[in-house]
Amino acid sequence: MEVVIFDSPSEVGCHVANTIEALLTSNDAPVLGLATGSSPLPAYQELITRYRSGSITFEHARAFLLDEYIGIEEDSPQSYRHFIESELTRHINMRPEALAGPLLSPASGTRAGYDYERRISEAGGIDLQLLGIGTDGHIGFNEPSSSLASRTRVKTLMAATRRDNARFFAGDEDAVPRHVITQGIGTILDARHLVLIATGSAKANIVALAVEGPVTSMVPASALQLHPHATVVLDEQAAKHLTLHDYYREMFELKPERMGL
Ligand code: GLP
């Protein structure tokens, strides 16, 4: 696992945008996995800026959402599809039909998870999966105790996650759905490169557990330790409890350019 630490969230965003730019320029049909939440926003803003300046194109890119609420219409402002469209894809030249989400309609029932997995594999798998981390250690919506081998399926949110996400529902915790559909941890681990973003001191404890603690389903993000190409991009606030903080800083400063991002 590579841990990269910057002074500010905007530098974190630039680094993640550099990583995505490297993929876009080296791959004819790049497949992105996109995460919601506030952590990836500086990266999305940077990507929009670079697209507008003509330095990158998303013409041949495809994207898969990490997760989605159940019981919220896709075009509602609270849906994750709507979030990604308004924060990123509407402002770049990605074809609207190139963005896929794990829609769960009453008719699709339990098949929705299988169907989404099939669509991801038909696209050739995900090249780069962006991730945030919940304060309880969740990635996607894989709450603690999720199997590290889990696939796309329905999950029930923990009270703490609904509380954290109430800010997107005008502060009304009761309005946050109880059920979601999420890529499983096994699905996430299938992506070729995982990039987890965390900023702010509220994430410092869980980042230390995920990066330096034991691999356990009680901290779903600790599964990144099992991946051969996982990058954790942090600001100083989120990195402050890492035991090997100085080593990570040094490792990145000394990283040979030929190793890429
Ligand atoms: C939600 C999403 C996660 C995201 C998390 C953290 O729960 N399902 O994918 O990582 O929020 O969000 P934030 O980056 O706003 O802290």
Image: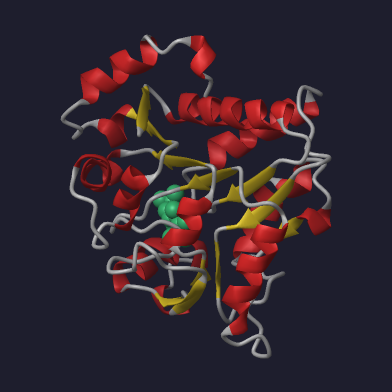
Q: Is residue 169 left or right of residue 2?
A: right
Look at the picture and state if 194 lies above or below 153: above
Residue 18 screen position, x and y as percent: 59, 25
Q: At x 65% / y 59%, what residue is drawn?
A: 121
Residue 138 placement (x, y as % from top left): 36, 59
Q: Which residue is drawn at 55% across and 41% down?
A: 41
Q: Who's the residue at 47% across and 79% down the image?
A: 179
Q: How many marks?
A: 0
Left or right: 28 in relation to 154: right
**154 up-or-down from 142: above or below:** below
Name the residue at the bottom extreme.
Answer: 107
Query: Residue 35, position in %: x, y?
Result: 54, 51
Q: Which of 234 and 130 is in front in this view?
A: 130
Q: In this view, does 120 lie to the left or right of 156?
A: right
**Residue at screen point 68% across, 51% down:** 124
- Ligand 1 quadrant in view: bottom left
In this picture the colour scheme is secondary structure
In the figure, is residue 176 to the left or right of 117? left
Pick the quarter of the image with the N terminus: top left
Horizontal and vertical percent for residue 164?
A: 37, 61
Q: Which of the 4 image quarters holds residue 204?
A: top left
Q: Inspect this view and state whether residue 102 appears.
A: no
Please say whether residue 144 is visible from this viewpoint: yes
Which of the 4 image quadrants contains residue 71?
bottom right
Location of residue 5 (image quadrant): top left
- Of 82 and 232, the residue lying toward us: 232
